[in-house]
Amino acid sequence: MTVSTEQVVETLKDFLEESQVSINQTVRELHGKDESYHKISLPDIVVFPKTAEEVSKIMNVANNLKVAVVPFGRGSSLEGHVIPYEKGITIDFSLMDKILEVRANDLLVKVQPGVTRTQLNKELKKYGLFFSVDPGADATLGGMAATNASGTTTVKYGVMRDQVRDLEVVLADGTIIHTGNLAAKSASGFHLNGLFVGSEGTLGCFTELTLKVYGIPEFTTAARAVFPTVKNAVEAVTSILQAGIPIARVELVDESSIRQVNRFSETAYAEKPTLFLEFDGNEAGLKQDVEFTQEIMEDHGCMEIQFETDNTARTKLWDARHNLAYAYIHGNVGKKMMVTDVCVPISELADAVIYARTELDSIGLIGGVLGHVGDGNFHALLMIDMNNPEEVAKADEFNEKIVQYALERDGTCTGEHGVGIGKQKYQAAEHGAALQVMEKIKVALDPNNILNPNKIVKIESLGE
Ligand SMILES: Cc1cc2nc3c(=O)[nH]c(=O)nc-3n(C[C@H](O)[C@H](O)[C@H](O)COP(=O)(O)OP(=O)(O)OC[C@H]3O[C@@H](n4cnc5c(N)ncnc54)[C@H](O)[C@@H]3O)c2cc1C
């Protein structure tokens, strides 16, 4: 900051209450990291706005004083997205946590950005509705929209970008805009919803979101299917998708990850490559889908299938899958987690997963391969001792190889976690000249480069 912290704090206190502006060391430390291995850096000031108007005034102050601003949801991102390497102000949206309106007949909901996905689903259940996107962490909907998050249900319901009907956005100069409306489709104007979703706090702050929701299906069945090899499991998924079966979830968990699950979730699942599956719909359709899937899986060497229709058993199965990253974290105290996140065309998936598993075995670090294989998106999860330069170098080299493999097959370096700083070095290789278009958009919307500066795209002009 070219102005002093005290000066900025005083200006912010003109319109924010004392408790909404903090320079406390512990509060700053909580906002100087995410859930990844990236280096910590603290903001100078953390603010807790309650309204869009307050966010607008904060942006106005920051823009006039040329101070960096980082929007912050829950800090669950995995590529250093919220770490304020340029210091400045972090805007924490936790006080903007109201579910504003459930429009059950329109299958829409209006929320403030600090509402979390489990908070929303608890409320929607009263209406027989649910929100589909379910990343492994209980993230905020503002953060999920900003990273274009997805999860286990994406194979059927789509990613965050598919759920956003409208965003209220505060731009860098404090202007408040709406990017969409309530209509199910529109041919009017540029697709600003698409632009702002996934912008990782670099183009604006979301202060309200209108999202699609769905009716809770009449019947749901989950299954755990065990295979002799990862290749068998992935090829079975490809065949299920090619057969057009509307599967709701299909997740791969490899042998070493199943071992972590058993330890952490006190399960006794066979320690072999496993698919966690879910089907939903009406009873008759579901029966057919399940039978057809079972036949396909047996053709691919499936050794054991366990169906779970009971709600408690299904919840246990999916909790085990959702808690997998935490199983690695808790099982490896003192180490940090690095997660690769490539997404490849489905026809390339089996070979890509095998490549990742082979490379992982060859470097000898603790880790597993898992992922949302129905979308072609998989993760290699590694636990690294950040004080051991050899381990860090091995992990970096591994990550690079996996990304390179995906890009050579016209895939992407990140299927869902986003760019932050971790995937920035691959942007030129992935986007080519299109990266310059992104840079021009950033400069047009944020000429002073104050919004989450140097994330996704690098602009050199901060503070000039
Ligand atoms: C164990 C674990 C499992 C995970 N599994 C998945 C997964 O399966 N799929 C997946 O997609 N992700 C996954 N993630 C990553 C993470 O949960 C997502 O990136 C999440 O969407 C971030 O939400 P958040 O509220 O924590 O946002 P933060 O981490 O606080 O912020 C993320 C980004 O959004 C921006 N931002 C936050 N709020 C706003 C706002 N109101 N306006 C504008 N920008 C904003 C921030 O500046 C930052 O760039 C996982 C993370 C963990 C720790």
Image (spheres, grey):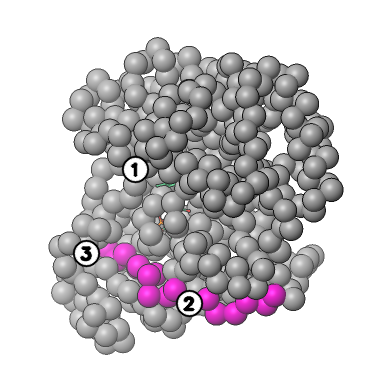
User: From the viewer's perspective, is residue 345 above or below residue 283?
Assistant: above
Quickly name the residue at label 2. 98
378 relative to 5 in the view: left or right = right
Q: Secondary structure at mark 3?
A: helix
Is 112 in front, or is 102? 102
Residue at 60% x, 70% y is 124
Disc on res. 226? none
Question: Is 190 in the magenta?
Answer: no
Type of amino acid at the residue the image marks with label 1: Ser
**Mark 3 or 1 closer to N-term?**
3
Q: Dot 2 surroundings within 10 Å: few (below 14), some, or many (20 or more)?
A: some
Instruction: Name the quadrant of the C terminus.
Output: bottom left
Q: Disc 1 to disc 2, how far (Cα)?
A: 28 Å
Q: Earlier in the sequence, mark 3 or mark 2?
A: 3
- Tell me the quarter of the image containing the N terminus: bottom left
Looking at the image, which residue is at 54% across and 35% down? 371
Would residue 297 be found to the left or right of residue 53 on screen?
A: right
Label 1 sits on residue: 36
Helix, strand or loop under label 1: loop
Ranked by sequence position, the earlier of labels 1 and 2 is 1
The kind of residue tagged 2 is Lys
**Residues in magenta, as a range:** 88-104
Viewer-nearest residue: 459 or 131: 131
Return the x and y of residue 378 as percentages of the image width and height. 54, 33
